[in-house]
Amino acid sequence: MPDAYDYVIVGAGAAGCVLANRLSADPRTSVLLIEAGGADGNPVHLVPKGFYFTLNNPRYAKAFTTRAFGDGHTESLVRGRVLGGSTTINGMVWNRGWAPYYDAWEAAGNRGWNWARFVEAYRRIERHQLGGNDVRGGDGPVDIEIAGPREEACDALIAALERHGVAFQQDMNGSGDERVSYVASNIRRGTRMSAAKAFLRPVRRRANLTVVTHTEAETLVLSGTRVTGVRCRRGGGGTATYSARKEVLVAGGAFDSPLLLERSGIGNPDVLAGAGVPVVVASPNVGENFKEHRGVLLQYRLTGVRGYNAEASSQARYLWTGFKYLFTRSGMIAHGGYAVSGIYRSDPDSDAPDTQCFFTPISTSAVNPMTGRMVVDKHPGAKYVTYPLHPTSTGSLHITGPGLDDAPRLDPNYLSTEHDRAMLVKAVRRAREIVATEPFARFVAEELQPGPLVVEDADIVEYGRNKGVAGAHGLGTCAIGPDPDDVVDASLRVRGTEGLRVVDASVFRDQPSGNNNAPTMALAWIAADIILAENG
């Protein structure tokens, strides 16, 4: 392997795979893609429901432990550490959000970052089951399929939402109105379409593209304030340094990207001093502005309807369901974490849709499936996750020492604003109203979680803070902005440096009214256009 390339990309996740594909299209340009994890060749990565078994497997994921919550517990926020990054282990929801939240970027002073630009990127990326139109793509590299076939409990919930004025739409991403749909996912014929499968695998044979795995970036190499390369730890032991003739593109995600910058001396001087890292570039907002959805999982015991529990309530049934999936690529295993998604107002006085829900007729009240075990209830059941779309609480993520082995300090700071606490209460109350509406109400035997004791506003907030669920949508830790203290500018260049950009969900200023999966790929597509234009 050579040790110098035109572009060195750190992280082979949603953004890194897109960048590697686009930048290596010119055979005169050499590209190195560095991934801390390993290959994605295990067949479990092809199975949509396989995330139950990979999400907390240290072979494929890295857990970031939070500071202790009010009741003393900690939580682990998990990100993919494998080719494809989190797109290889996530629930594959393809909810893109809508115009106002993208246009707000440009309104805040980030020229060129707007809805029209993202829509064009989506149209280039997607190969949608419903075909292309003005707002979705029809022949791109990422297959988008809608969960199916239709199921009785799901249809009953959709009908209940319609009674609350939330219209059914075939395409969740087709408008910004209140809407409910069967979930759209990056899936092709019942198999996961990760960023690695869509963007990296088709170009792996390019002579000018090099991919190294089990290689973790320790620090950026700087000459003054110019970034000239990356020093890495190799999985088999030892280190390696790779030089970039043009640019280093950091695509480690909202967790690893700010930590890499800080270990390299780019960050808040007080944080760096406390971690024993000399300051190279003072950038006070690195690691700040961490935003994440915080919601509540409601689980129900159902009666009079089959749901999906019967297909996985014993080892024999689960094996039979898996056997059928192998031959048909259909059924509950063939789509991601949820079957139905809704976006709606938390109350009639809301100016716009402000709450998101996910529903599936599976319940796992005996064990949290995020522990890496899929243990469903013997009786029919359902999950209903609800959270406010646009949290205003901001947390932080910072290094505590100079090395990779120094555990970072993650403080998500959930529900720290009155706005977020009030919104969570409204979201939970709205969810319970919907579930209590016919025709879904006839199937509900009891609420298993949070249960009938969590009713008062204060109880809902306390439950959400200490027993709520994170959306796995962390972002904002290297946020874009026009001000001198903003980490990256409108070209995603890190202020105060040369030859360095950050291209991943860490640059998002706010939640894009959906999930991060699709917006991050679109962001990287746009970034590739900018990089190619600026570098000729």
Image (cartoon, rainbow, N blue to C red):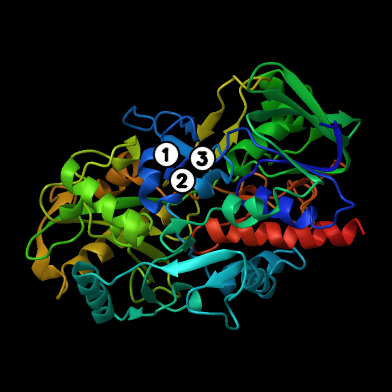
**Which residue position holds label 3?**
79
Q: Which of 356 and 95 is in front in this view?
A: 95
Q: In this view, does 151 lie above or below 325?
A: below
Check contact, mark 3 vs mark 1: CB within 8 A: no
Cα–Cα gap, marks 3 and 1: 11 Å
State the image coordinates of residue 526 (x, y, percent, origin top left). Answer: 72, 62
Q: In which quarter of the image is the C terminus?
A: bottom right
Q: Along the polypeptide, which appears first: circle 2 or circle 1?
A: 2
**Mark 3 or 2, closer to the camera:** 2
**Toward which corner of the image does residue 44 lie, by quadrant?**
top left
Q: Dot 1, how many residues are within 10 Å of its Cα: few (below 14), some (14-19), or many (20+)?
A: many
Q: Which mark is residue 19?
A: none
Q: Along the polypeptide, which appears first: circle 3 or circle 2?
A: 2
**Which amino acid type is shown beneath numbered disc 2?**
His
Say if residue 355 shows up in the picture.
Answer: yes
Residue at screen point 27% across, 80% down = 162
Q: Which mark is residue 45?
A: 2
Check contact, mark 2 vs mark 1: CB within 8 A: yes
Q: Residue 54 carries which label?
A: 1
Cα–Cα gap, marks 2 and 1: 8 Å
Check contact, mark 3 vs mark 2: CB within 8 A: no
Q: Along the polypeptide, which appears first: circle 3 or circle 1?
A: 1
